[in-house]
Amino acid sequence: MNELIEPSLGLIVWTSVSFLILMFVLRKFAWKPILDAVDERDQKISKAIQAAEEARREVGSLAGERDRLLADIKDERDKIMADAAKTRDFIVSEAKTKAAEETARMLGIAREAIHNERNAAVTEVRNMAAKLAIDVAEKVLGRHFADQARQEEFVRSEMDKIKLN
Amino acid sequence: MRYTLQKHVKFVKLLSQNLSKSNFSLLSLFLFVVFASSAALASETATLKDSTSTEEEFNPVTTILHHVLDNHDWHLFDMPDHDGTTHPVSLPLPIILYSEGQFDIFMSSQFEHGHAHVNRGEREYAMDEHGNITDLAGHSVLDFSVTKNVASMLVAILLLLLIFTRGAKSYEGSHSKPVGLAKVVEPLVLFVRDDIAIPNIGHHYKRYLPFLLTSFFFIWINNLLGLIPSGANFTGNISVTATLAVFTLLITNFSGTKTYWGHVFTPHVPMWLYPIMIPVEMVGIVAKPIALMIRLFANITAGHIIILSLVSLIFIFKSLLIAPVSLAFVLFISCIELLVAALQAYVFTLLSALFIGLALEEPHTEANH
């Protein structure tokens, strides 16, 4: 039974030599390439993740920029609209005043013309009345009225003839 | 030591994940191996029984020891001759002897299983039934033969080289994920790195990784080869586990920091306790690798002995009826042994890493003690 725990020199030598050689060979041809490749890949992956994060952040900032621009544009539009409204109001009111002025001017002119026309008409009426009066007087003076009543009727009829319109 | 339990659980999980991932073919292969091994062992024991039954009773102890110990040839099976006697059929292995300043190299078949002497020049060698070779003239003989264990180890090394150099090759070119053999190799390599080396050793882990990786896979694959019927009991040999433990001992103590040696020679105890504490600490240095050596040796040898004992039951009871029971137990134990093969490789590597980590201790961690 104690053969089980009896060390054997040959086996010890073979094991140690083989193990050492195996360790150095595997270190050069297996462990180093495998671990280097894994490390490289890990780095690549973490770099890719970083890049993705950066890109996402960039996209986020671009979205912010876009929103800002949109807000600016909206402001601008509002301002333009407000200006336009103001201009419109100004133009409208301007037009209104101008129209009113024009109307007033026209009215003035018309009034003046009317006035002048009226004056002219009145003058003419006066002249005509005077002429008629003279005519009537001529006629009156040319005829002899028998009675007062007929006289008055005559005048009235004459007066009726010279209706002013 | 706080890791061990959760790490064990994690390791078993990793194993079972890998097993379940690689579909049923692996399982069926495993079952085939187990059944074949049981059958092979049974036939082997049967032939042994045949050869011995004529003169003596079947002795399970000799049979089991024969299988557990090292041999000068690789015994495959026994063949009955035309006249009824059985002859062992085995693979002869090279015998390398060093005696009187001379190397003698010949094949083990020349001993005819211990029945013949071998002459080399004026030296005559004989081999006893335990495989010990002596010089008949009484000179001391150093035996560097390629025994069954050595041959098995060389097969394991060949497999390791094949698997891992090819695994490393599949990393050529840039891939975003492991391809080919790397799919199998990478999780295991990273397991050793991330769950054994880094947590125990810390940021100096890179220097020790080749040793830890090599010992993990070396022990594992040798454990597995030992489970194959008529395989060698390489990792269940005290010489082998002692050699591996000595590597750990050397690495641990050569990388010992001032703090580590401080713990040994100036422990934090009153001065008058030094005569007790220093020897205790020195014993501790040696006890750790001895524990490694015995753990691996005992676990693997015990597994082999259990399986062989279960098969021997058939011949002890001299009844075929016991065979199904026996084989069922062999199947069960073989499953456990398959796990133990990986687990012991893991434990050896984990404890090596732990000892290295303790030796690398920096002063600032002293406060935590």
Image: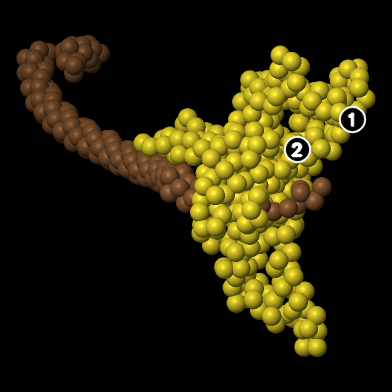
Chain colours: A brown, B yellow
Image quadrant for the N terminus of chain B?
bottom right
- Element under label 2? helix
Of the residues shown, which amino acid type is indicated by label 2?
His
What residue appears at the point 78 percent right and 83 percent down from the top-left corner?
B275
Residue A128 visible in the picture: yes
Q: Quadrant of residue A147?
A: top left
Residue B240, disc: none
In this rendering, the answer to whether A96 lies above or below B253 is: above
Q: x and y percent of residue A134 in the render? A: 7, 22
Residue B66, disc: 2
Image quadrant for the C terminus of chain B?
bottom right
Of the residues shown, which amino acid type is indicated by label 1?
Glu
Q: x and y percent of residue B79 in the render? A: 70, 20
In this rendering, the answer to whether A31 lies above or below B208 is: above
Q: Nearer the viewer, residue A144 or B263?
A: B263
In space, the residues marked 2 and 1 are separated at their CA atoms by 16 Å
In this rendering, the answer to whether A134 lies above or below A68 is: above
To which chain does the residue with label 2 belong?
B
In this rendering, the answer to whether B256 lies above or below B329 is: below
Disc 2 packing (10 Å; few <14; some 14–19; many ≥20): few
What residue appears at the point 73 percent right and 53 percent down from the top-left corner?
A6
B207 vs B90, left or right, is left
Residue underneath mark 1: B57
What residue appears at the point 65 percent right and 50 percent down from the top-left corner?
B136
- Element under label 1? loop
To which chain does the residue with label 1 belong?
B
A145 vs B363, left or right, is left
Residue furthest to the bottom in view is B272
